[in-house]
Image (tube, helix red, strand yellow):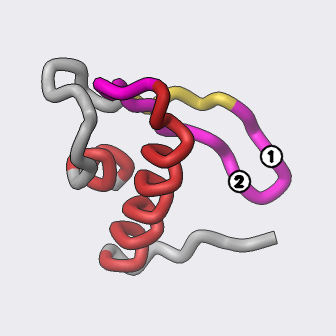
Amino acid sequence: MLRMAAGRMPGLRATARAFILQKAPRDFCVTYVNVYCNRPQGMNRIYTDLYRNILDVFNECGVQIMKK
């Protein structure tokens, strides 16, 4: 589902597939997804859009993301 969400993103590098890497365990969440982009100066916006896509895909698949 994370790769599906990344696949909906414009501006990501087509030659470098999104990859899943556990970056940080937290009480109620884990940071997992990483992507490559052509505009690194826009990473904050890209991750904002990516996280929105992740929420959409999880909702479409019936997976609830728990909130703290």
Quadrant in which residue 15 is drawn? top left
Residue 48 in picture, x, y percent from top left: 52, 54
Residue at 27%, 49% (x, y): give it.
9
Q: Horizontal placement of 1 versus 33: left or right?
A: left
Mark 1 packing: few (<14 Cα in 10 Å), some, or many (20+)? few
Q: Residue lying at the far front in this picture: please name it.
A: 41
Quarter holding the N terminus is bottom left
Quadrant in which residue 28 is drawn? bottom right
Residue 16 in picture, x, y percent from top left: 23, 20
Judged from the image, the secondary structure of the residue bearing numbered disc 1 is: loop
Q: Residue lying at the far top in this picture: please name it.
A: 15
Q: Is residue 54 above or below residue 25?
A: below
Q: Is residue 25 magenta?
A: yes
Residue 37: give its label: none
Residue at 84%, 53% (x, y): give it.
27
Q: Amino acid at mark 2?
A: Cys
Disc 2, disc 1: CB below 8 Å? yes
**Residue labelled with disc 1:** 26
Mark 2 packing: few (<14 Cα in 10 Å), some, or many (20+)? few
Q: Amino acid at mark 1?
A: Arg
Residue 29: give its label: 2
Q: Residue lying at the far left in this picture: please name it.
A: 15
Residue at 29%, 24% (x, y): give it.
38
Quadrant in which residue 22 is drawn? top right
Determine the CA span between mark 2 and mark 1: 5 Å
Which is more toward the observer, 49 or 27? Answer: 49
Q: What stretch of residues is rendered in magenta? A: 24-40
Q: Is residue 43 magenta?
A: no
Q: Horizontal placement of 13 versus 20: left or right?
A: left
Q: Horizontal placement of 51 versus 9: left or right?
A: right
